[in-house]
């Protein structure tokens, strides 16, 4: 059965602001004890964006004007809110919480962020069970001065309700008992708008259990929130009768291994040893699934709530543990910032692809061995020098010879079968093409004689033409080829083989400027 945790981060804007603006540990700090608020400038002036408990105790409310708030509480201290920084801090925290589960989703609300959802399914035993796992999460957040409450249930909606209305720091609904756990909670726990709550109260419906047995059609018509979801839909989501999709902050890794430590690790040498063990485990997982990694990410979860990563890319899919570990060593574990220590280490393969077994015995294929050695060399060079420093030719989507191939970082050369209408290409290509003079027996025919680099040559054999036309589907200014080209492969009476083309046609439409001849390459 699916199990979800909802982490309610009370006063998150205040918490994020305090982390971004640290001050000496003063008990009288405005952000800690005295009434404090974050303000947001709108078309109606300054309004209260977030409040600490001391400010709420004075009767101040969210979205109240700052002027009215100061009249009620003259001692109110305030600072400008930083919504973008709040969101970034929430995402960093979500990334750190991936030490408990690879599936962490933001829990949005109309006016900001107030918590997270975590899919706990299948991972509870790694932390000693759900109760121990939830307590460990809350204790870790408390050490970072992040106040939080946690609810655990079969559905995200039920977990959300328990986190905010369960009455305890950690509230857990036993498996299959969501209805009983929700029954005594107020209807506000269904994530409905204030006007719907007031209307339910007017009808004497104050608890979720009061909604059982009522005509569902009438409830659906009468009570809806701002998102168009009725009370019935919210109730069904909480009870698991209606699905509620969640979007993880990062795509869950299919191939991922992790190790949690009893004490924070501060030594890079120890990290290298643990990374070697993780590489072995991940290689075994990839082999079991018939996959190979194209990208690897080593993530350290620091005790201060941040993460540090080391990433390597591979030119070709691989699952050889020795090769993968060598790439990390070449890249350098010193790039990891351990801070005050890491208490968990995870290795994942964000990009993987099917990889067939390759024979490496005495009777192995020489071409395959050469390709594997080349890919391994590219991987090591990229790890040592950086991906931008290692370039390899790549095919591009253009039939213009000058731009049909580009240099791309950190990838092996690509090979593609020639187009059925494409002739052979020269071993040496001039970029740009060099001008020449030519005389042809027919205006649209192959050259009979030509002068290139002040040397006259007589053509003994010629084949062609191979015509390349402008890209008609592109706007005129975006076309890489402006005029039609007719390519010929010619051989002179001395045995030299050339690749030449005429730019322009003698058809009365493409004669301004007149057609011209160019030398584009040499054949072996």
Image (cartoon, rainbow, N blue to C red):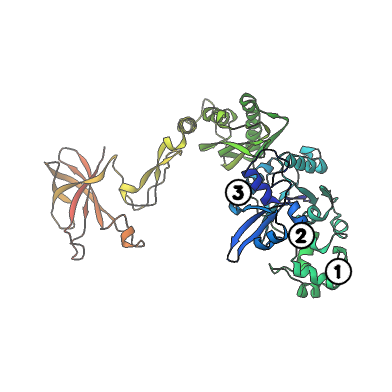
Q: Is residue 183 above or below residue 321?
A: below
The residues tagged by marks 2 and 1 sit, at their Cα atoms, a distance apart of: 26 Å
Asked if residue 355 lies left or right of residue 36, the reply is left
State the residue at coordinates (80%, 75%).
218
- Quadrant occupied by the C terminus: top left
Note whether residue 104 is visible: no
Label located before the other in sequence (3 or 2): 2
Label 1 residue SS: loop
Quick one: 35 or 460, which is closer to the camera?
Answer: 35
| Residue occupied by mark 1 | 205
| Residue occupied by mark 2 | 59
Quick one: 93 or 181, which is closer to the camera?
Answer: 93
Label 3 residue SS: helix
Label 2 residue SS: loop
Whole-percent x, y for residue 29 in the image:
70, 44
Which of labels 2 and 1 is toward the front?
2
State the residue at coordinates (37%, 51%).
419
| Residue occupied by mark 3 | 88
Whole-percent x, y for residue 354 in the image:
57, 42
Which of labels 3 and 2 is toward the front?
2
Whole-percent x, y for residue 260 in the image:
72, 34
């Amino acid at each position: 059965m699916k199990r979800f945790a909802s982490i309610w981060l009370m006063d998150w804007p205040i918490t994020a602001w305090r982390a971004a603006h640290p001050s000496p540990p003063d008990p009288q700090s405005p952000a800690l004890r005295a009434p404090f608020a974050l303000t947001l400038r709108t078309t109606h002036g300054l309004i209260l964006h977030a409040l600490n408990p001391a400010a709420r105790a004075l009767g101040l409310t969210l979205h109240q004007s700052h002027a009215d708030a100061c009249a009620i509480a003259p001692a109110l201290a305030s600072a400008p809110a930083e919504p973008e920084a709040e969101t970034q801090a929430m995402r960093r925290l979500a990334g750190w919480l991936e030490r408990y589960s690879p599936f962490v989703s933001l829990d949005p609300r109309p006016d900001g962020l107030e918590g997270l959802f975590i899919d706990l399914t299948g991972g509870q035993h790694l932390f000693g069970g759900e109760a121990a796992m939830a307590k460990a999460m809350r204790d870790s957040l408390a050490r970072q001065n992040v106040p939080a409450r946690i609810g655990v249930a079969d559905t995200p909606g039920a977990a959300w309700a328990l986190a905010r209305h369960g009455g305890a720091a950690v509230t857990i609904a036993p498996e299959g008992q969501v209805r009983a756990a929700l029954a005594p909670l107020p209807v506000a726990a269904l994530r409905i708008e204030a006007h719907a709550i007031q209307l339910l109260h007017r009808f004497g419906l104050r608890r979720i259990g009061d909604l059982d047995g009522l005509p569902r059609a009438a409830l659906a018509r009468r009570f809806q929130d701002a998102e168009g979801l009725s009370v019935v839909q919210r109730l069904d989501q909480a009870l698991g009768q209606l699905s509620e999709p969640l979007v993880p902050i990062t795509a869950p890794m299919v191939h991922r291994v992790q190790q949690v430590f009893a004490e924070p690790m501060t030594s890079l040498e120890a990290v290298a040893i643990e990374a070697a063990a993780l590489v072995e485990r991940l290689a075994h997982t990839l082999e079991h699934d018939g996959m190979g990694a194209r990208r690897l990410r080593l993530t350290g979860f620091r005790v201060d709530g941040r993460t540090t990563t080391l990433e390597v890319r591979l030119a070709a899919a691989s699952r050889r543990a020795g090769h993968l570990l060598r790439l990390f060593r070449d890249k350098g574990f010193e790039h990891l910032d351990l801070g005050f220590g890491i208490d968990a280490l995870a290795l994942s393969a964000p990009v993987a692809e099917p990889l067939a077994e390759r024979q490496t015995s005495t009777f192995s294929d020489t071409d395959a061995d050469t390709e594997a050695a080349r890919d391994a060399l590219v991987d090591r060079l990229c790890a040592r020098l950086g991906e931008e420093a290692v370039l390899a030719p790549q095919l591009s989507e253009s039939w213009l010879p000058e731009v049909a191939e580009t240099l791309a970082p950190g990838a092996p050369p690509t090979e593609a079968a020639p187009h059925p209408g494409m002739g052979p290409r020269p071993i040496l290509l001039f970029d740009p093409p060099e001008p020449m003079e030519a005389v042809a027996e027919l205006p649209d025919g192959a050259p009979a004689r030509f002068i290139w680099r002040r040397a006259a040559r007589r053509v003994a054999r010629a084949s062609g033409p191979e015509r390349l036309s402008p890209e008609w589907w592109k706007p005129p200014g975006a076309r890489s080829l402006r005029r039609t080209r007719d390519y010929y492969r010619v051989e002179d009476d001395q045995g030299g083989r050339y690749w030449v083309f005429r730019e322009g046609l003698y058809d009365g439409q493409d004669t301004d400027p007149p057609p011209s001849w160019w030398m584009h390459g040499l054949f072996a």
